[in-house]
Image: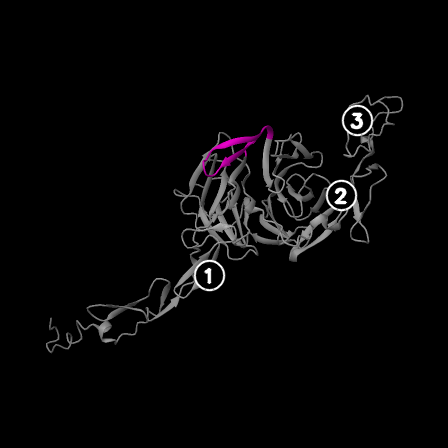
């Protein structure tokens, strides 16, 4: 309408600046009754009202790929790691293997193996006493677990070929081993003991136990290892909860994530994505799942407890392909979601009692390492421990000291201890000739021992008094 009376308010109307090329848009021009509006193509974001369009790095903002993501101008490209294939241009990566992936679940009184394809299960070990921590070794096809009780705890293993009997690896030396991790390259077993506030290691057969870290720990809960890079990671939900990192010989301890970088209460669950170099954890007090780089940077909250995200008390988690799996105490279930966004949380199985630790069992989760520095035990007399940079170091078990050759070990036992001949152990002298093979090589129970008439733990005098 000619509101001005001289048509000066109407002479610029209904002019399509987009067709006349008088606009200043860099990509998309949308004509309006008065003027125009600029926009950008997918893969770009507008700047200065859309007059400039900048490329969006989807790899660091939307995380669209299971494995490797490369940003391109206006888009991105996904690729899968070796041993995986994809049917959607690399966005989703699946194992290219004839070996089925199984979920191992410790459930206090038994350990179940769940087929992730059929969602069927079988019991691998039963009649257990509060099994908690759990891991596996794909090289020898064995499973390892801890049993934690007030009257006595232990770490055990069972090799699945032939279903061998349960083998006790540690008993008297552990109190509350809530987390354990298998080093499939160095052939060692790591665990954190919440009762002793330590992180310890031994050979996979239980020999040569050594305390790696005994300071700075209050309530160590979960532990995972990255043997290829030579690092281990753990959670601690003590008075000042944090996620820690150190080389696998216990050196160069550092705090990655703590209260200052993210709200932390009970950092329970912990797992690694060794392909994308990510750390995943769950907090059972604040009820969230988060991820970060292996240096503690780029922290992202993937899910928080809410109507669409049932996160009540996550205890343990594991990862395979594009999925993150975890156990929840309150819902008594195993759940999963996409590891990059965790928007759709799905229940896999439910349990009658609280589920504990969880692991996806597949060879692709434990790849061999070229030029393994601990091949043939690294030439070490007892322990070969991996370090960063593809290196390793020899170490000695408790009460033994590494010698000048950096390979052999010499005992540092006290006068009240008996030195075992072959197993690098120092045991209390009272344990000698008590009918118990405490050394593991029989050296504390020679044929010359007199008949033992007392109970284990008692000293028998020369007159057979206890």
Image vertical order of residue 466 relative to residue 375, above or below: above
Image vertical order of residue 395 relative to residue 417, above or below: below
Query: Could you tell me which residue is drawn at 43 percent across and 38 percent down?
Result: 347
Viewport quadrant of the N terminus: bottom left
**Measured Cα–Cα span from mark 3 to mark 1:** 65 Å
Report if residue 364 is visible in the image: yes
Q: Which residue is mark 2?
A: 398
Image vertical order of residue 126 relative to residue 53, above or below: above
Residue 103, position in %: x, y? 52, 38
Q: Is residue 88 left or right of residue 406?
A: left
| The stretch drawn in magenta includes residue 111 | yes
Q: Earlier in the sequence, mark 3 or mark 2?
A: 2
Q: Which residue is mark 3?
A: 435
Residue 421, position in %: x, y? 82, 38
**Measured Cα–Cα span from mark 2 to mark 1:** 48 Å
Q: Which residues are magenta?
A: 106-129
Between 55 and 253, which is closer to the camera in this rendering?
Answer: 55
């Amino acid at each position: 309408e000619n509101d001005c009376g001289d048509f000066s308010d109407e002479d610029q109307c209904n002019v399509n600046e987009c067709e006349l090329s008088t606009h200043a848009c860099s990509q998309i021009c949308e004509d309006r009754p008065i003027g125009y509006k600029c926009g950008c193509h997918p893969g770009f974001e507008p700047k200065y009202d859309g007059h400039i369009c900048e490329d969006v790095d989807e790899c660091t903002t939307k995380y669209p790929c299971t494995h490797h993501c490369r940003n391109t101008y206006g888009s991105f490209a996904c690729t899968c790691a070796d041993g995986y294939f994809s049917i959607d241009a690399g966005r989703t990566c699946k194992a290219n293997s004839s070996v089925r992936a199984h979920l191992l679940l410790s459930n206090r009184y038994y350990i179940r193996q769940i087929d992730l394809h059929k969602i069927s299960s079988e019991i691998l070990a039963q009649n257990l006493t509060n099994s908690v921590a759990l891991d596996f070794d794909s090289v020898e096809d064995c499973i390892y677990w801890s049993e934690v009780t007030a009257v006595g705890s232990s770490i055990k293993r069972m090799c699945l070929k032939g279903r061998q009997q349960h083998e006790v690896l540690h008993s008297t030396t552990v109190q509350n081993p809530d987390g354990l991790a298998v080093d499939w390259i160095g052939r060692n077993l790591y665990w954190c003991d919440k009762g002793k506030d330590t992180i310890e290691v031994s050979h996979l057969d239980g020999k040569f136990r050594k305390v790696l870290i005994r300071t700075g720990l209050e309530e160590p809960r979960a532990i995972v290892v990255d043997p290829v890079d030579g690092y281990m990671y753990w959670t601690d939900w003590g008075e000042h909860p944090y996620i820690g990192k150190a080389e696998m010989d216990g050196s160069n301890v550092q705090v990655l994530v703590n209260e200052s970088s993210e709200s932390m209460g009970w950092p329970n669950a912990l797992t690694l994505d060794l392909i994308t170099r990510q750390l995943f954890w769950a907090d059972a007090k604040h009820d969230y799942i988060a991820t970060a780089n292996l240096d503690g940077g780029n922290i992202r909250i993937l899910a928080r407890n809410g109507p669409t995200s049932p996160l009540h008390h996550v205890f343990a988690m594991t990862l395979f392909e594009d999925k993150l799996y975890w156990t929840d105490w309150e819902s008594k279930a195993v759940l999963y979601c996409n590891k990059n966004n965790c928007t759709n949380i799905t229940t896999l199985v439910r349990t009658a009692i609280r589920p504990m630790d969880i692991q996806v069992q597949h060879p692709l989760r434990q790849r061999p390492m070229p030029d393994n520095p601990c091949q043939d035990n690294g030439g070490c007399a007892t322990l070969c421990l991996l370090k960063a940079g593809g290196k390793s170091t020899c170490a000695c078990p408790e009460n033994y000291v590494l010698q000048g050759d950096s390979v052999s070990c010499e005992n540092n036992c006290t006068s009240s201890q008996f030195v075992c001949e072959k197993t690098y152990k120092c045991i209390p002298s009272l344990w000698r000739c008590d009918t118990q093979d405490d050394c593991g090589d029989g050296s504390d129970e020679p044929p010359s021992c007199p008949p033992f008439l007392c109970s284990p733990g008692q000293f028998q005098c020369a007159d057979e008094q206890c």
